[in-house]
Amino acid sequence: MLHIFKLIRYQNLLMLAFMQLIFRYGFLKLQNVPLALADWQYILFVLSTVCIAAGGYIINNIFDQETDSDNKPNKIIVGKHISESMAYNYYAGFTVIGVALGFYLSNVILKPGFSAIFIIMAATLYLYATSMKQSLLIGNVIVALLLAFSVVLIGIFDLFPATYEENRPRMGVLFGILLDYGIFTFLINFIREIVKDLEDVNGDYNQGMSTLPIVMGIQRTTMIVFALSFIPILAIIYYLKFYVFTADLMFSAIFAIIFILAPLFYFSVKIWSAKKQNDFKHLSTVLKWIMFFGILSILVISLNMKHNAG
């Protein structure tokens, strides 16, 4: 059972579920607006995206067996603890459950066409694992986009069907906030995917992959990541200045500076001189924590606004 949890990368799935639950119960539920899904239906929505993501991790592990034998020989699951045929069965099971739940929820909100979203997500994860991963930057963009889209998907299924003429401006603002967080999620995960490529450069090279560190070299890639790291830094500073400070949300501002902005500056300083595999592994973990606190900030802002209003 433990090997199955490792196969589906349960920590990442918990982060995905946590993110979707925080945005619903730590943000949307506190805004006094109608939501399309009942609580139990929203749990099914979270389960759907988690199952599709789990399928994506499994198919990725199946096709990464040779690369992982070079990069992470101690972490190999498929072919060592779980047979390849059994892994395919798990992949099919998780993917079918995820897509089926998506089909059900699309009919619940009277938008059956939306079920195509879940099919496209599952198909994209399969294509990523089987072919796109080897292409320069395309794989990085796809992984980051899918995670960012899982934030926007909340608005599509929970806000959009409950929108009518009178509440359209208010719903538009809330959807815009979800979109902003989706962009932040994309930026952090895109950078993290490149850092993970830096960490796995030796195994990827042996497998003939065309990742950025292989094409550009490790030193040039770290310089590119260093430059990219200033995009979320500047975006957060802009957000703090024009939205958080102007709304007198001082506690939210302090939280963002300590737990998001400061670690991002730390990341930028460290990536400049990073050379070893352990350096990149550490920086990948730093980005994961930045992502965690970035998600948590929506709850902090919501509670801060409620406190100010009270």
Image (spheres, rainbow, N blue to C red):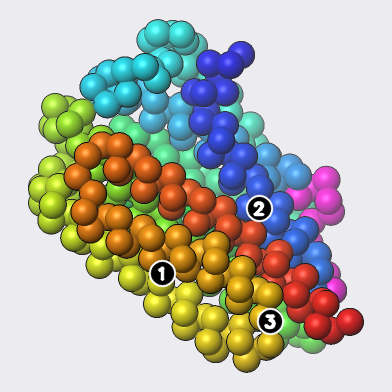
Kind of element beneath mark 3? loop
Part of the protein shown in magenta: 32-42
Q: Tell me which numbered mark, 2 or 3, is placed earlier along the sequence.
A: 2
> Distance of mark 3 from mark 1, alpha carbons?
20 Å
What numbered label is drawn on residue 20? 2
User: Identity of the amino acid at label 3?
Assistant: Leu
Q: Residue at the location (65% across, 45% down)?
A: 17
Q: In which quarter of the view is residue 202 placed?
A: top left
Residue 134 appearing in the image:
no
> Distance of mark 1 from mark 2, alpha carbons?
21 Å
Work out whether 255 lies above or below 99.
below
What numbered label is drawn on residue 232? 1
User: Identity of the amino acid at label 2?
Assistant: Gln
Kind of element beneath mark 1? helix
User: Identity of the amino acid at label 1?
Assistant: Pro
- Mark 3 vs mark 1, foreground winner is 3
- Mark 2 vs mark 3, foreground winner is 3
Q: Are marks 2 and 3 in contact (CB under 8 Å)?
A: no
